Structure formats: C-alpha cells, structure tokens
Image: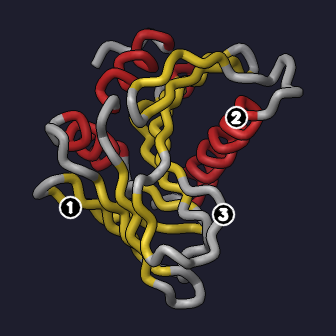
Amino acid sequence: MSLLRTVRRAAVAALALSAIAVGMSQGALAAEPKVLGSFKDWNAFAFDEGGHKVCYMSSQPKKKEPAGAKRGDIYVLITHRPGEKSFDVVSFIAGYSFKKESEATVDVGPKAFKLFTDGETAWARDADTDKALVAAMKDAKGKPMVMKGTSGRGTKTADTYSLDGMAEAYGAINTACGVKR
C-alpha cells in the first residue's frame, strides 16, 4: 500500500472521529455534521468539507474485551467522499495504539478480513476489501461483527459490534451523498 493512501486513510479516520466529537459537543456551530438519523445501533452523518460532501456512519462496540483494559473511544466508521471518488472506506478506531506492524482481523459471520494498523486505527488494504467488508456487514442477518487486535503493550482485544441498523444507516449515507449502491 502506498504511503499516500495510508496517510489519506488516516486523515479520513481522524476527520470522521473529529466530526463525531464535534457532533456530540453542544457548543459546535458551523463545523457540526448534520445528523442523518439513528438506526438502532448505528448513526449516520454528513458534512461539507471544502465544498465537497462527506457522509459517514458509526457504531460503538456492545462488548469490549478485556473488560478492564484502559482505552479511549472505540468506533467503527464507514465513510463516503464522492468528491474524491472514495466510497465504503471502513475504519476501526481501537482506543489504543496498535502494536507496530501488526494486523487486526474482523470477523463478520463466516467471513474474515485482515486489516492493516497504524496508530489507533485499522483499515482494509484496498477498496475491494472495503467493498467486500461492507457487503458482509449488510448480509450478516443479525450476526455480530468482531474486530480483534493487539495493543502496543501486547494486550489482545476483541470488540463485538451489533450490525442492527447498519443497512439502514448505510442507505442514509448513500442517499445523502448521492451514491447508488
């Protein structure tokens, strides 16, 4: 993977996480993302960035293991940036720094996906894997999604996400960003 793609994905995740934080704060004004809706365990948002629309959806895990581990905010995000022709970018914010040069894995039903890690974030290696991961999430039929990783301190973690409402939130970001999927 090119360094440019890695840096770009890190910026996408950081921006989306910032937008979530801004959206949750009460004092936000112009930078506040528009809430498209809450769909069971998922939320959908849109905002303008430099004249281009960005749409994303997020969820937090229902279960975090080990339960007592000290961690920051934990999210999964799916982001569309039509102005950059970037769609279905899946990123996981782990709430800790991953072990350097480690991989994380995501299990959705019987399907498993390997992710690369950088800092606190894990991503698919390419757009085809992002697309396949989103398709698996939509087809999961009530099964959970589990993201596993290893922290810089060697702690193995497993975060279990509900996919209830995922398809509806995905539909909302597609509509808001004019994406036909």
Rendered view: 79 above or below 161 = above
Rendered view: 112 above or below 129 = below
| Residue 148 % position (x, y) | 37, 70
* Residue assigned mark 3: 72
Q: Quadrant of the C terminus?
A: top left
Farthest-out residue, left: 110
Q: CA distance from mark 3 to mark 2?
A: 16 Å
Displayed quadrant of residue 1: bottom left
Disc nearer the start of the sequence (1/2): 2
Residue occupying the point 60% across, 47% down: 13
Mark in front: 3 vs 1: 3
Residue occupying the point 27% across, 46% down: 133
The local crowd at label 3, few if under 14, some if 14 to 19, many if 20 or more residues have their Cα within 10 Å, is few
Residue occupying the point 53% across, 15% down: 36
Mark 3 and mark 1 residues within 8 Å of each other at the beta carbon: no
| Residue 4 % position (x, y) | 60, 53
**Left or right of 81: which side holds 130?**
left
| Residue 19 % position (x, y) | 70, 34
Residue occupying the point 33% across, 29% down: 165
Displayed quadrant of residue 27: top right
Q: CA distance from mark 1 to mark 2?
A: 29 Å
Disc nearer the start of the sequence (3/1): 3
| Residue 89 % position (x, y) | 44, 40
* Residue assigned mark 2: 19
Q: Amino acid at mark 2?
A: Ala
* Residue assigned mark 1: 112
Q: Amino acid at mark 3?
A: Gly
